[in-house]
Image (tube, coloured by chain):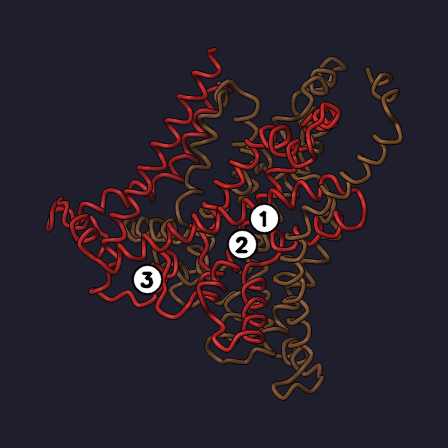
Amino acid sequence: MTKENNALPLANGGKIRFRIGFNRKQLCIPYGVFLACFVIVPLFLIVFYAFTDENGAITIENFIRFFTTPTTLTTVIISILIALATTVICILLAYPVAYILANSKLGKGGTLLMLFIAPMWINFVLRAMAMKDLLTLIGVFGLNNYVNVIIGMVYDYMPFMILPIYSVLIKMDKSLIEASQDLGASPLKTFVKVTFPLSMPGIASGITMVFMPVMTCYVISDTFGNGLITIIGKLIDEQFTTFQNWNMGSAMAMVLLVIMLVSMWVTGGFKSEDTRGTNL
Amino acid sequence: MKKFCSVFYIALVLLFIYAPIFTLVLYSFVDTPIVGIEQIFKIGFSFNLYVKLFNDAALMKIVWDTLILAIVVALLATLLGTLGAIGIYYSKGKLGKGVSAASRIPVINAEIVTAVALVLLFALIFTESRSYFSLVVGHLVITTPFVVLSVIPKLKQMDPNLYEAALDLGASPFRALVSVVLPEILPGILSGFMLSITLSLDDYIISAYTRPAGFDTISTYVYGAMAKANANSSLPALRALSAIIFVAIILIVVVQNVRARKKGAK
């Protein structure tokens, strides 16, 4: 079949193919232009604002202030701690869920998985309001603002951890597990040596979906922290809305941007296969 | 024993996920700004909050504005993202790689950074920096990459010979794309569309920074109402709205599953 195809007017075919390849590639030009205008250029604007003062003179004062102000640094540390706690709790809660759904009869047909991710379709501010109502009802709201904020964060972000771990586990080659058991490994050893390492891409993907948003999503920390807990996202927000200091705000945003680019580079996020389960 | 543990654990996590939602539905029938046990006995159940919701013209406008915005954004994002995905997939060179890498930035970037970056841009090019245009662009920035992520796997699954065969049979490249490639990747396009609607409805930060004056989405309105937390706010009526949204979503999930079951039975 292929041979016959090639035997057809080859020169002509080659010409068409060249022209078509060019045509199809062109389809990404509108999106490329859109990204250049509204993603790339704005990021350069952040860099520009971060390195200038309000008169437009070049300075590194914003960064010096950022790294020498004790309250700012406390906020950064608190953000990281809250994000770490949330991420770890999310993994601990989500991994068994994903594992059970992927491996036992319970998860067959996807009904249960749908139940776990259905809340993602409810507006997250409304979901936060619901959780706040429940915490108020059982009388723990306001007892410990940090615990409340972490409960709120875990509640909002857990589905984002379940989904990628599940999609890695469900695709996993089950014969590897059988092979490990045939070779005499105990179920625990099989899990530690085979299943868990193979599910690492899912966990890594989940971490990128949880850690960074938690550090910056000030809606949850405001709602659950009684207005007493500030995270780095809120600092940036204040610079842009309350203090109107866009240069300082941009410097803070740039710090986050650098963290993001480094983590993207480390995890190979620029080219790696996607495991976020966007196809569900 | 193992099975019992699994069932017990799943039930426990589901309880954690659904207890707040059930609380919200329960208190959507209790007309009170304060959520407490005694309110149920003192005030009792009624449909007052639902009546308030549908009689509150300002609140209903916000609901419609949010839905219309989500649909406009999803349509544009689907068009832009589908074309982008096809372009990225068939361009093996620098162009495709560059667009693909740039497309991942809004996915991984913190939303607040994306938002303030857009604020800087719009302040630079427009005198009135916040408009419906800036709002739509802001939402497109966070939704379109997910359309691309939904469509590309379908392009990879597609038999590459199909397109070539269509050309060999005399179809123009455009015709081949529309009648051969498009039907093959349609499921990806649809899930990208749905994902865009979800992300747009769910968004707070981008909306807060790019919306024109006087325009509210459900998110910005609820956040504002919670921040003020005064007794006159429409916050209780929003419980009725949330309850409706919740029941609608559960219905969609159930219907989808029944359909999937039927498909599986065939």
Q: Which mark is residue B80?
A: 1
Residues marked 1 and 2 touching at CB (< 8 Å): yes
The x and y percentages for residue B40 are 15, 47
Q: Which residue is mark 2?
A: B140
Query: In percent of the image, x 31 and y 63: which residue is there?
Result: B225
Chain letter, colour red? B
Which amino acid lies under the numbered mark 1 shown in the image of this protein?
Leu
Chain letter, colour brown? A
| Tag 2 and tag 3 share a subunit | yes
Q: Which residue is mark 3?
A: B226
Mark-to-mark CA distance, 2 and 3: 27 Å
Q: Is residue A247 above or below residue A5?
A: below
Which amino acid lies under the numbered mark 2 shown in the image of this protein?
Leu
Q: Is residue B254 above or below residue B115?
A: above
Q: Quadrant of the N terminus of chain A?
A: top right
* Residue A151 visible somewhere in the drawing: no
Query: Tag 3 or tag 2, which sits nearer the N-term?
Result: 2
CA neighbours of label 3 inside 10 A, class few (<14), some (14 to 19), many (20+): some
The x and y percentages for residue B219 are 38, 57
